[in-house]
Structures are given as structure tokens and as C-alpha cells.
Amino acid sequence: MRIVPRNELRDLPKTVHGGQGWRLTGVEDFSQNLNPLGPPPELKDEILNAVSEIGHYPDASNEVPKKAVADYFGLDIDNVAMGAGSSEIIRNFPAAFMVPGDRVLMMRPSFAEYAQQCRIAGASIDFMDLMPEDDFRIDSERLSQMVRDNHYKAVYICNPNNPTGRIEKREKVLDIVKECEDLGTMVFLDETLLGLSPEAASTSLTKYVGKFSNLLIADSLTKSFAIPGMRIGFGLSSPEIISELEKVQLPWNLGTLEQAVAAYLMEYRMDYPDVVARELRAESAYMHSRLDDIGFPVGPLSDSFFYFVSVEDLGLTGEEMKRLMLKGSVMIRDCASFGDRFRGYIRYCVKDRSRNARFMAAAESVMDELRGR
């Protein structure tokens, strides 16, 4: 029997993600964008307290975590959809709203799952390239022209953008949302990485949820609380959009433990990412200065807590730099998976002082080796 997949799946590559350094003994993983201080210490006790409930099915409506999210953001429960990580929100958006032939606009480089899930839904994708001469920031005039010239079903924005780390100001993103609403185009705004920025409160569009008919915000507890092993994400939007998202979400998408953890963190520990964000900002400036002193590629000071830089001036590809850094037991992200244009780019994150020292020692060894070759 010949197995024939859907046309949309033919030649569709698997997406590539960072965060696999844990598989290598003794290697410090700088390829992932997680809170380096780990989860709040008391979270383990909250998980153990919830273990007694795993003998029955979780609440399929996610009522308790939804209410906790809604209360924190000052929204109604109908403005919230829970997901198995923000990845499920990313999946459910095109599953609910796109049909073959729809067109969407995305930035490049950006998170690969957006394009993956839109292609699975049969949508075609236009890319607006973010350019180094613009510091990899969105060119508002160019985006506006593309949106006016094309009937897009949706525009995707990641803020801060992954992998570039650049944060767009609230007013700039609001202008995009307003123009798209006037033109009948939806906006998928991913704020998953914003929680670890000191500017989160002044940048996020969460307080505008429900004020626009076209806006969906995706967020997650994964990065801010360093719990990637627990898949907890959520979408914030109008009740009309949330209702459609929930029609295609996985049944029991949050397990009993995830629901308990989500409710606890949203109710009691949303102060934690703010504390970590301030520490990361100080460490980022320190690390940037020290790496610049030894000639390691850093680019401009990051808006967030990770760096996206070219190593082409060193005559290297990202993969070659990754191998060199691994000699010092440090894992970084080779960015070739973001497109051929970025084969000469790497991404690395900022951690605490002791682990950043490991990164800087490995970087200094690499620079010494390159100078001696």
C-alpha cells in the first residue's frame, strides 16, 4: 500500500529548535532562551501537592488556570484560551482561521513554527526580510505597503523577535494592529519572550485585548519560569476568536499538574520574572562589554536577554562557531535553520554571572585559536 500524505505535507521539513544541550554531559546550554535562575524554589512543593489528583482526568475546560490568567491581566475568562505551551496556540490559530489559498505575512528571520503551521493549514507565506542595516527591526512603512497591496489573512509579529532579540515599541505595534484591523487582516502577536524584559509592562499589548477585533496574543510560562518540561501557554483575544481557537484545541491539553502550576504562578508569583529581568539586563551589559573587549562577535546591546550576531567577519559559519564553542563545553545556536541568509549567524543567551563566565572563557579560547591559526 502506498501512503500518500496531504499535499501540504509534501517536502515540509521538521522545524529545528534549540535547548538540546542537556543531552551532552558537562555542557552549559546557551542555545535556549530560558530564565537561567530556574523555577521559583517552592514550585516543587506545589507540584507534589497536586500529584494526588493525577488519578482522574483533568478539567477539560481549564477553568481554574483560565480564571487565574484572566484575573492577572484584568480580563474576562472568555478572553483566554489555554494551550500546551504557546506552541499549541501557534498551531490552533491557522487551524481555526486559515484555508488553502489564504496568504499570510511573516518577518524573516523569526520563529519557524509560524510558517510550519500555516503551511500545514494550506496557507501561502510572504516574508518581509528584517535587515541588518535596520538593526533587524520592522520597517513600518514597508510592512504597511505590503499589507495594503495584498489581502493577507494574518500578519505575524514576535516581540521580542526570536532569534534577533529586538523589541518593537508598543506604539509601533499598535499602529500595525490598527491598520490591519481597518484592512480586515488578523494579527498574531507572540509575546512569549517579553516576560524577561524590564520593559514588559510598557511594551505588552495585553491591556488592549478585546479592544481590537483582529488581535491574538500568544504567551507562555515556559521561558519566564524555566519550566519547558511543563507545557503551559495561553492565548488572549476577543471572545469570538477565543471561541474558535477552543474548537480546535487538543482535549485535556493541560494536565492536572500543569493546571495547578499555571494557577499558582499566575496568582502568586508573577513578580518573579520581573526580578530576573532586572538581573539579566545588568548581566547582558556586563557580558556584552567583556566579549567586545576580546573581539568576540556581539553586535549592538540586546533589547532582551539573547544575542543574534554574525560570525562571518571571522570567516566562520554558525555551525563552525558552534563546534568551536563546544570545545569549551558551551552550546550555542547555529542559525542556519532560520534561512540560508543566516548560515553565518549564531544565537546565544545571557545567564547568571558564574555561567556567563564559562561562556566568556570559551569565547576567549575560540578567539585565541582563531588568531593563532
Image (spheres, rainbow, N blue to C red):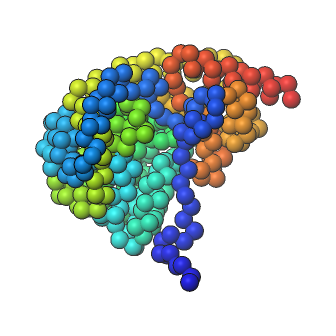
Q: In which quadrant of the rendered view does residue 21 lie?
A: top right
Task: Please provide percent x and percent y for residue 23.
Answer: 60, 38
Q: Residue furthest right?
A: 373
Q: Residue furthest left?
A: 76
Nearest the eye: 233 or 54: 54
In the shown orientation, is residue 122 left or right of residue 338? left
Task: Please provide percent x and percent y for residue 329.
Answer: 67, 28
The residue depicted at 42 percent of the width and 70 percent of the height is 122
Quadrant for the C terminus, please: top right
Task: Please provide percent x and percent y for residue 307.
Answer: 54, 32
Nearest the eye: 233 or 157: 233
The residue depicted at 46 percent of the width and 32 percent of the height is 34
Quadrant for the N terminus, please: bottom right
The residue depicted at 54 percent of the width and 71 percent of the height is 10
Q: In which quadrant of the rendered view does residue 119 lie?
A: bottom left
Nearest the eye: 29 or 366: 29
In the shown orientation, is residue 83 left or right of residue 305? left
In the shown orientation, is residue 281 left or right of residue 184? right
Up/down of 213 relative to 203, above or below = below
The residue depicted at 16 percent of the width and 36 percent of the height is 71
Up/down of 203 relative to 116, above or below = above
Task: Tell how many labels.
Answer: 0
- Report whether residue 20 is seen: yes
- Report whether residue 347 is seen: no
Task: Please provide percent x and percent y for residue 156.
Answer: 39, 52
